[in-house]
Amino acid sequence: MCWFVPGFFWGGMWIFPLAMFGVVLFVIYSIFGKGLQKPVWMNPNSSSGGMTELESPVEILKRRYARGEITKNEFEQMKMDLLS
């Protein structure tokens, strides 16, 4: 009879709780990741499922001009190119 084998029942009972603990950790890690992105339910202001809206090219151009990366002439030329 196999239930008489030493360690068959009592010695192996730690495997299932350890496996379940690993599964729970995997599920938690897969939801929260490395902490870089919060789940959707933790960001009430977002209606797009945690994704931020993309900036328009003109907004990016304005930001570059405000930072001084481009001159006013370059800004005006690029803006005209984008809007035409």
Image (cartoon, rainbow, N blue to C red):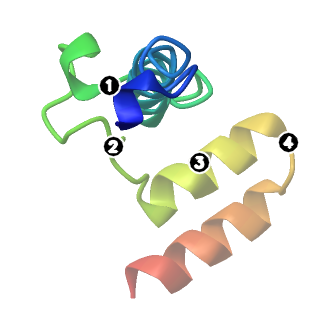
Local crowd at mark 2 within 10 Å, few (<14), some, or many (≥20)? few
Q: Which residue is mark 2?
A: 51
Which amino acid type is shown beneath numbered disc 1?
Pro
Q: Earlier in the sequence, mark 2 or mark 1?
A: 1
What separation in Å lies between label 2 and label 1 (alpha carbons)?
11 Å
Quick one: quadrant of the N terminus? top left
Distance CA(mark 4)–CA(mark 2): 29 Å
**Residue at 38% of width from left, 23% of height from top?**
20
| Crowding near the residue tagged with mark 3, few <14, some 14–19, many ≥20 C-alpha atoms within 10 Å | some
Indicate the position of residue 67 as horizontal and vertical percent values. Answer: 79, 36
For residue 73, which quarter of the picture? bottom right
The residue lying toward the viewer, choosing from 41 and 33, is 33
38 or 82, which lies in front? 38
Q: Which residue is mark 3?
A: 62
Specify which label sits upstream in the sequence, 3 or 4: 3
In the image: residue 81, left or right of residue 40: right
Q: What is the distance, in whole Å, between disc 3 and disc 4 at their CAs?
A: 10 Å
Q: Tag 4 or tag 1, which sits nearer the N-term?
A: 1
User: x and y percent of residue 79 in the render?
Assistant: 54, 70
